[in-house]
Image: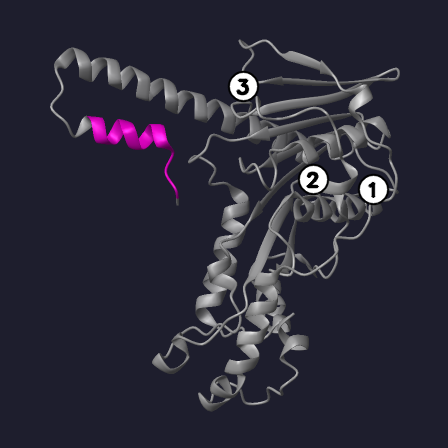
Amino acid sequence: MTQCTESAVFKEAFLTKLSQDEFKKLEVRRKEHLTLQRNAREKYYKHRTKSQENPQQYLSLIIDNMDQAKTNLPRFPFVSKADNSLTKLHHHVTGVLCHSLQKAYAFTWTDQFASNCNVTLNCLMTVLDDVAKNNGGSLPPTLYLQADNAAKDNKNNYVLMFLVMLVKAEIVKKIKLSFLMVGHTHEDVDQFFSRISVKCHQQAAVTLPDLHQLISTSVKPMPYIQHITSLWDFRKLSTSDYSLCDFKDIHHFVFRKADDKVTLKFKNWPLHSEPYRELDVTNAIPDLDVPSIVEGIQPKFTSILTNMSGDLEKWMSTGRYVTLNFQYSSLFC
């Protein structure tokens, strides 16, 4: 797991020769850093608990992506020399935990799509729809969303404008979007991924149905599993003058609607001692038209399929495939 830069700097500094005064100052900084990340984490735990104790009022979700190297297909518990160099198809897994329903979601997708916030928002849409179906057709008024601190997937203008639209349309009344400190993001969704990884080391996943079966038995209760074959293009829909270039250090956002005004409040960390800053984003909201479908296939994906087609006979010769036919695209994609 990637370590945060500041923690690495502290460890390296402690390995050098420090005076007693330098050591004390560095130790104070280190403790302040750890206290800050702990406070941010405890805020997440608070939101999670509130949603579990009062699911009619609060909905808590955490979303993240699994390390794709663990779900490349075909995958076997033991790699032989014969198949080590053969082409495999990358299968990404985006996971969502809904604490209100105590339910896990796993979305698989390939490099047919670019790795960006369109995946995040489409997965989020599916989860919100499922929660609403389990809640009499509507969502709890408050949504707590915890996401990874990654600009391309989560921390960008498109995601913020999508959440603003949810509040504008009164699908929910309030949204709190939070990000943990970089390098301190290991949470319950990673434990979900860990269980999938353990299963991957225990049994073969030759095709996509195999991978889905493997995921289905990784945790209890059985997670919701869906393979993404098309995406709504929210990046095209959301065209706003607001830029997040100045929001790199922001880890806490709050979206509300009062009368016809939609506000975005934000601060560096979810601390009571830090005041909110506020933006009126009412005029920044794009038209709520139905977005278009993401068009085209990534060149990388086409290249991988071509290489897999060329390697298929080699895969067959390894003896790994007993019943595999040459319609590989229907089995892997």
Q: Identify the residue position indicated by label 1 in the image.
A: 135
Is residue 166 within the magenta segment?
no
- Quarter of the image where the N terminus is located: top left
* Mark 3–mark 1 distance (CA, rounded to whole Å): 33 Å
Q: Magenta region: which residues? A: 2-13
Q: Nearer the viewer, mark 3 or mark 1?
A: 3
Q: Amino acid at mark 1?
A: Asn
* Mark 2–mark 1 distance (CA, rounded to whole Å): 11 Å
The reply to whether the C-beta atoms of the residues labelled 2 and 1 are less than 8 Å apart is: no
Tell me: 84 left or right of 111. Answer: left
Q: Residue at x 58, y 40 (%)?
A: 152
Q: Identify the residue position indicated by label 2 in the image.
A: 100
The reply to whether the C-beta atoms of the residues labelled 2 and 3 are less than 8 Å apart is: no
Say which mark, if any, is on residue 149.
none
Q: Amino acid at mark 3?
A: Asn
Q: Residue at x 49, y 65 (%)?
A: 199
- Using the image, determine if residue 262 lies above or below residue 118: above
For numbered disc 1, what is the local secondary structure?
loop
Tell me: 293 left or right of 12. Answer: right
Q: Nearer the viewer, residue 223 or 128?
A: 128
Q: Main secondary structure of the magenta part?
A: helix
